[in-house]
Image (cartoon, rainbow, N blue to C red):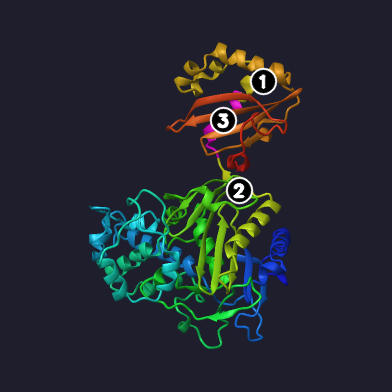
Amino acid sequence: MSTTAAETGTGALTGHARDALDERLDDATVRRAPASVAAVVQSGRVVAVSAHGEPRRDGSPTRHGTVFRIASMSKSFLAATALALRDEGLLDLHAPAADYVPELAGTRFGDHDARLTLDALLSNRGGLAEDNPWGDENLGSSRTEIAALVAAGVPLAAQPATEYHYSNLGISFVGRAIEAVTGRDVEDVVRERVLDPLGLRDTRPDAQLYDDDDDLAAGFRTFDDGLTFTPEPYVGSGALACIGSLFSTVDDVATWMHFLGSAFDEAPADGHVLAAASRREMQTVRTLIPTSERSSPGRELEGAGYGYGLVVEHDRRFGRVVLHAGGLPGFSSHMRWHPTTGIGVVVFGNSDAYGAGAIAGDVLHGVLTRVDAPAAIVRPWTATLAAAARIDALLAEGQPLSAASDLLARNVLRDVPDEVRSRHILQVLAEVGPMRTDAAPFAGRVLSASDRSTLRWVVPCERGALVCDVRMIGLREPLVQEFTVQVADAAGLKPQGESARAADHYRVAP
């Protein structure tokens, strides 16, 4: 086992990344594939990489730049291409999909015609039955074969646009729609609009597009947990290729993850390929996935869902995490990233038994834990900070909230009259003692903010602390619409009895 820092990655993060990789990639894990690569990245740069085995079992070692098939990770490239065409007015994601793919005109749910849209198909809520095993075997089927199959009638397993069903066939119709409006093979459109402009030179849709001397991993299967392997020929690239045919490297995927994840930054990466707003659409839940389907030891989710070509998890500790897996006979791949910090993980193995998703999830969680990553970074409105500071001063002086009536929405003093609020404050102070006069300045007592309209801060007392929350209403001149004071827990970071939430770890920036 060897883990090395990339030339561009130095410092504390590199050490944490090495530790997380070494901890997870034990012998029992890496033996499940003849070759594997796992990399920790930040903002498009590989920070640490771990390579194992032989990609063709011919004596040549796996390298940092070995090319692996990334399978369904391809869906994110297809989605980006579709949104780019949508932004140019060439595709309408909410029009009937049959406008672009006529074979879908006869799609039915029970005895009724069903209206499918590209939006529903691209976000896996089109109602088509889950089809992973079938999709793997039919990746190379011709467009004529798939068109005839669909024209014969595709019964839906659920009402369109109502629930999550992962459908390779459904998303492939987005590829057919792209071909309908461009008159080009979808693979060429993806290359010209996404791969080439972003410089992803090692990402290609067919093994035959690589030279003989390129370091291309072959596929293998194991049925005895890695004791023996049998070669697995590449699944062909046909009508379903747009949802799972791509090959790539950790460097190219690192660039891709940064391009997408940086859309949440104050200064996103260049949007000439796809606007930041459209990239955020890809990384925003459009279809709910039951969290029981995404459970993993050591991690808790507040929610999860499918965006456009990407899965989005809302981790209770680290907030938004974006990802997609890839699996085909002979390969297992995974990419996931934390937009707040730009830290991500890429894992490839040339065996479908490798379990790249579980590995990537554990490694990213390990790195984020080691660096104590914030779940989000929030910059409250100036009015939020000013209102909270003024209310904090009134509280310290024992003044009623009505003394700041110019800051308050009309509901505040009706919802909790001054005399009721004063009694409550006396009750909580009886529990924690008088407010300390030597407390740090207000700015040093800010705890968190769930968004720009809110702020939470602590007020130290002789036998404990109070936690204060203010919530503003967004107007031209924001007003306070809610203010609460509660007894803090033993750590002094949140109200007693409040359950853990990602917002506890939001970092407030000026």
- The answer to which of 315 and 432 lies nearer the viewer is 315
- Left or right side of 122 for 151: left
Q: Which comes sooner in the sequence, label 3 or label 1?
A: 3
In this view, which residue lies farthest toward the bottom?
Answer: 212
Q: Which residues are magenta?
A: 380-391
> On the rendered image, what quadrant is the C terminus found in?
top right
Q: Main secondary structure of the magenta part?
A: helix
- 405 lies above or below 238: above
Q: Is residue 382 magenta?
A: yes
- The answer to which of 97 and 192 lies nearer the viewer is 97
Q: Amino acid at mark 1?
A: Ala
In this view, which residue lies farthest toward the top?
Answer: 419
Q: Amino acid at mark 3?
A: Ala
Residue 166 quadrant: bottom left
Which residue is labeled 2 in the image?
A: 318
| Picture coordinates of residue 227, whole percent (x, y) | 66, 75
Q: What number is the disc on residue 386?
A: 3
Circles 3 and 2, Cβ within 8 Å, touching? The answer is no
| Picture coordinates of residue 439, whole percent (x, y) | 73, 27
Q: Which comes sooner in the sequence, label 2 or label 1?
A: 2
Q: State how far apart marks 3 and 2 are (Cα).
A: 28 Å
SS class of the residue under badge 3?
Answer: helix
Q: What number is the disc on residue 396?
A: 1
Which of discs 3 and 2 lies nearer the camera? The answer is 2
Circles 2 and 1, Cβ within 8 Å, touching? The answer is no
Q: Is residue 94 magenta?
A: no
Which of discs 2 and 1 lies nearer the camera? The answer is 2
